[in-house]
Image: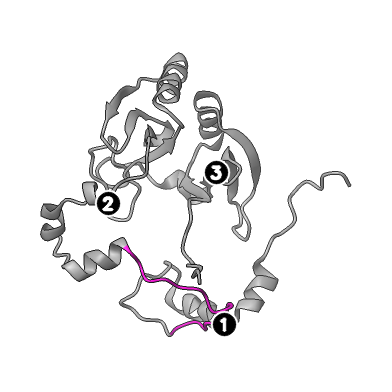
Amino acid sequence: MTIRTIRINGVHHIAVSTADMKTQIEFFSDVLGAELVGLFWMHGVPGGKHCFLRLNDFCSMSFVDLPANHDVPIEYGVTHAGTGAGASAPGTMQHLAFAVDSVEELRAMRDRIRSRGINVMGDIDHGMCNSIYFAGPEGLTLEVATSTAAIDAEAWIDPEVVELLGIAADELAAFKRPASYEGEGGTVTQPPIDPSKPHLNYPVDEYKSMMEVPDAVIFEHASYPEPPVQVGS
């Protein structure tokens, strides 16, 4: 019998903060060819604007423009890496890599980017992929990459780095083959708040109250299923 394992299966969208939504839309549309498919008030966030740019039918690039974003400075080495080898604060995006289908398309994308006046480094053969590197608005560090095959874990997991990170053999085996999970029909209840686990950065009392609200109530009162434009009505 085949066991259906519940796990993440791709990237639905990547959301990046912006203080210049129009410039980001112009760049991703004209320079990279992504189609604007959504631009609306951010659900449940007063004053927030949200946009979606289509990469394919199942993956989008998203930007979030909140009023407070305009008062947060860019600081390379802290908020932004600035290059594919640069440092930034733990938990921040070091760089963002998009995909194309072949080396030929990668070099054609390099042509497109350069034709818009943007400097590009590469392509570079990394073995697992070929890549080009360039900058986007507001300090984004961007990459376009292509792979001819899936990454082979036996070839690309370096024992020296495994040992350096203190990963034991049984841990490595579990990381490579995570435990299967079939789901429990949405019946698992909210666990107690454990300070040792990751948590969203809401005020403590507000967060505690939110986690106590039943899932059905959240779904009923926090959902925004209707688009801003009623097509065909």
| Residue assigned mark 3 | 60
Question: Which sits in the foreground, 209 or 173?
Answer: 173
x and y, in percent, of residue 122 in the image? 30, 23
Q: Which residue is mark 2?
A: 153
Residue located at (47% from left, 80% from top): 208
Question: Label 1: how many residues lie within 10 Å, few (<14), some (14-19) or many (20+)?
Answer: few
Say whether residue 178 is magenta: yes
Q: Nearer the viewer, residue 32 or 154?
A: 154
Mark 1–mark 3 distance (CA, rounded to whole Å): 30 Å
Q: Specify the amino acid type for callout 1.
A: Thr
On residue 187, the disc is 1
Q: Is residue 201 left or right of residue 80?
A: right
Q: Which residues are magenta?
A: 177-191
Which residue is most to the front? 1
Please identify, in this view, whether the residue under mark 2 or under mark 1 is nearer the observer: 2
Q: Quadrant of residue 223?
A: bottom right
Q: Say which of marks 2 and 3 sits in front.
A: 2
Find the distance from the CA under tag 2 to the CA under tag 3: 27 Å
Identify the residue at horizontal 66%, vertical 77% (top origin): 217
Contact (CB < 8 A) between labels 1 and 3? no
Prevalent SS, magenta region: loop
